[in-house]
Amino acid sequence: MSSVVTLPKSAVHGAMALVGLAAFVTGLCGARALAPWPYEWQACLAVMAWVTVLLLGADLAVNRVHRRASTGLDFTRRDPSLERTAVKFLGLLATLALLGLGYMSFPLYADPFYAPFFSMLPWLVLPWLVAALPYIYLVDRCMRAPHDGYWQMGQALLLRWRAVDRRVLGQYLLGWLVKGFFLPLMFVYLCGDMAELLGYVALPGGTKPLYDAAFTAMYFADVALVSVGYLVTFRVTDTHIRSTEPTLLGWAVALACYQPFWGLVSGDFLRYRTDLDWQRWLAPRPAAYLGWGAVILLLTAVYLWATLAFAGRFSNLTHRGIITNGPYRFTKHPAYVAKNLSWWLISVPFLAQGGWRDGLLRCLMLLGVNVIYWLRARTEERHLSQDPVYVQYALWMEQHGLLRHIPRLKGLGFLRYRIPEH
């Protein structure tokens, strides 16, 4: 291994984080100006559409992402095929039908919790399908390898098994499983935050209301951008899925952090929270309250910055380009570090009211949650290391990262990055 490793170029220009933030702020202001909305999901869909237009428009016009080799497109190529287009469109229809069958089959999705998503879905799917056919045709004619997952799915539906590449088809189905699971959840969270933010007649006064509003607004921006990420997987904007996490462990530790699995993990096994959170603890001490809350908001801002750095490319369990700037210039997992640190400050498990034994147990439970996120980081690194750009980035971070000294401490060598053997 060379002693000198250079930082590879990021898949997203650093200024796109500011574009995403501006898109979110102006979208939210527009949603508030047009309130009241009949339903919060309509305001959410409008904000998502606005963010998508600004983000993708800037990426196409300024960064010219459609010209990148990573898109798999060659605009000098002219190989139109109505047959391939029809097969791909058939594959898309079959995929959506499978998702619909899954939503109808699992009792989870009959819960009123998901009602905003299923109310929104008809407004999204029909125009999407109308636009999909010409989009597939125009993109297909420029693809260097046109037999993608949509084509494989269509061929499988036509029972042309000899033409099917099972690896490509498997990765395609896993990618859609990611979108099918996370988009409903993120959109519902988005609607909940939107309802709260639209409920503010004016910016609330007082330390606690201001903290609550800022905390909600940052998580609203996060889920808005994440929701866009699950929808905007276009090859022409270089936001398509390159690969999806292939291992059961990777899926298990990721899904454990989200409902309905998180309710089981945090409710039955790792219940680290108590009725005594930081706000109750520090309410009698205004100066300490202000400082503690400011640190939590700072960590939450770092978490949001990590999402903004993806510029509409974020989604769990997928590789959609390696990000090496923004907070990823300082550590490989800024979102996980910031989120886990903030949980210690929010829940203060060491102050459990059942005495020091209960406090120690709560701390161990939160450490268990931290371990889950460490496993997420390790499985993500193994997956992304299939890309030599990530290997170069990870090796650079070993030399220059903000936390590079921690794995060098005695007994912590297991934290060091190692190139996986494939």
Image (cartoon, helix red, strand yellow):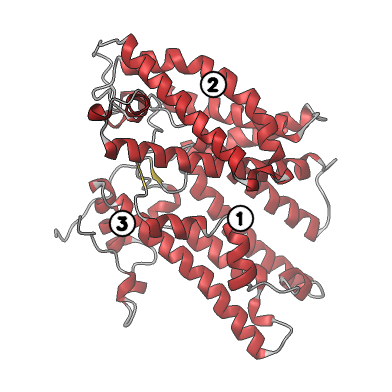
Q: Amino acid at mark 2?
A: Trp
Label 3 with label 1: CB-CB less than 8 Å? no
Please tell me which residue is depicted at 49% across the width and 63% down the height of the picture: 337
The residues bearing labels 1 and 2 have C-alpha atoms spaced at a distance of 28 Å
Where residue 89 sits: x, y (%)?
Answer: 42, 19
Q: Quadrant of the C terminus?
A: bottom left
Q: Say whether residue 224 is left or right of residue 137.
A: right
Instruction: Name the residue beneath numbered marker 2.
Output: 128
Q: Say whether residue 373 is left or right of residue 386.
A: right
Where residue 98 sits: x, y (%)?
Answer: 50, 33
Q: Is residue 408 above or below residue 326?
A: below
Residue 382 tag number: 3
Q: Quadrant of residue 102?
A: top right
Where residue 326 sits: x, y (%)?
Answer: 44, 48
Label 2 with label 3: CB-CB less than 8 Å? no
Label 1 with label 2: CB-CB less than 8 Å? no
Name the front one of labels 3 and 1.
1
Residue 260 tag number: 1
Q: Say whether residue 255 is left or right of residue 118.
A: left
Q: Does any portion of residue 16 appear in the rendered image? A: yes
Name the front one of labels 1 and 2.
1
Disc 2 secondary structure class? helix
Q: Quadrant of residue 406?
A: bottom left
Name the front one of labels 2 and 3.
2
Query: Mark 1 packing: few (<14 Cα in 10 Å), some, or many (20+)?
Result: few
Q: Amino acid at mark 3?
A: Arg
